[in-house]
Image (cartoon, rainbow, N blue to C red):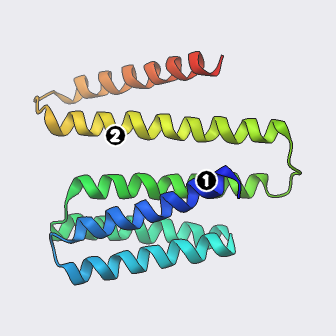
Amino acid sequence: MPLRKVVGVVCVALCAIFLGLSYTAVNPWIALCVFLIVFSFWSFALWRLSMRLILSALLVSLAMAVIGLIAGAVPMDIFFSVSFALTDWDLALLDQSLSGQEPSTGGDLLVSRHIQSLGLSLGIGSMVYLGGRIVQIPVPFGGILFFAILILFGVDRLWSMIAT
């Protein structure tokens, strides 16, 4: 099984698990239902590999996350669930774009770089999110915008250093 499919299956499971865990604060039975709905949507969409179904699975995951936030679910679990849902969607797009090509070393390098980029993005995003949850400093909007631009340029420089 190719690496992108293994990572996709793991991300589907983690997406459903984190979304289900976030709903346990609301009601354990609702958490089980949310887990089954999200897991079955993603599994069916990835099994059929239809971009409409994959987009529908992403929208279902995001809708469940928004409903969970409104209902009082745990925001940190929802953040990780949505991150893994977006990762699944991105890997499905990569899988579709590579489906017509024959396997080659260039394609393997592209997939490994793409997965490396996804891991870097998820890691940095998680650190920023957890840092924001730990450190609560009131910053004006202009300061936030400045820091966001600074982080984007920093990630771009870091990625270009890793790529070379």
Q: Earlier in the sequence, mark 2 or mark 1?
A: 1
On the image, the x and y values in percent for residue 66 come to: 29, 65
At a point 34% along the width and 40% down the height, the residue shown is: 126
On the image, the x and y values in percent for residue 98 come to: 78, 52
Residue 29 higher or lower than 87, as above or below: below
On the image, the x and y values in percent for residue 83 come to: 41, 51
Gap between marks 2 and 1, in whole Å? 19 Å
On the image, the x and y values in percent for residue 39 come to: 46, 74
Q: Could you tell me how many numbered marks the image carries?
A: 2
Q: Secondary structure at mark 2?
A: helix
Instruction: Kindly identify which residue carries mark 1.
Output: 91
Determine the residue located farthest toward the right in the rendered image. Answer: 102
Quadrant in the rendering for residue 124 = top left
Between 67 and 36, the one lying in front of the other is: 36
At a point 66% along the width and 16% down the height, the residue shown is: 164
Instruction: Kindly identify which residue carries mark 2.
Output: 126
Crowding at label 1, few (<14), some or many (≥20) Cα neighbours within 10 Å?
many
At a point 24% along the width and 39% down the height, the residue shown is: 130
Quadrant in the rendering for residue 88 = bottom right
Crowding at label 2, few (<14), some or many (≥20) Cα neighbours within 10 Å?
some
The quarter of the picture where the N terminus appears is bottom right
Between 77 and 62, the one lying in front of the other is: 77
Quadrant in the rendering for residue 111 = top right
Residue 75 higher or lower than 48, as above or below: above
- Is 146 placed left or right of 6 in the picture? left
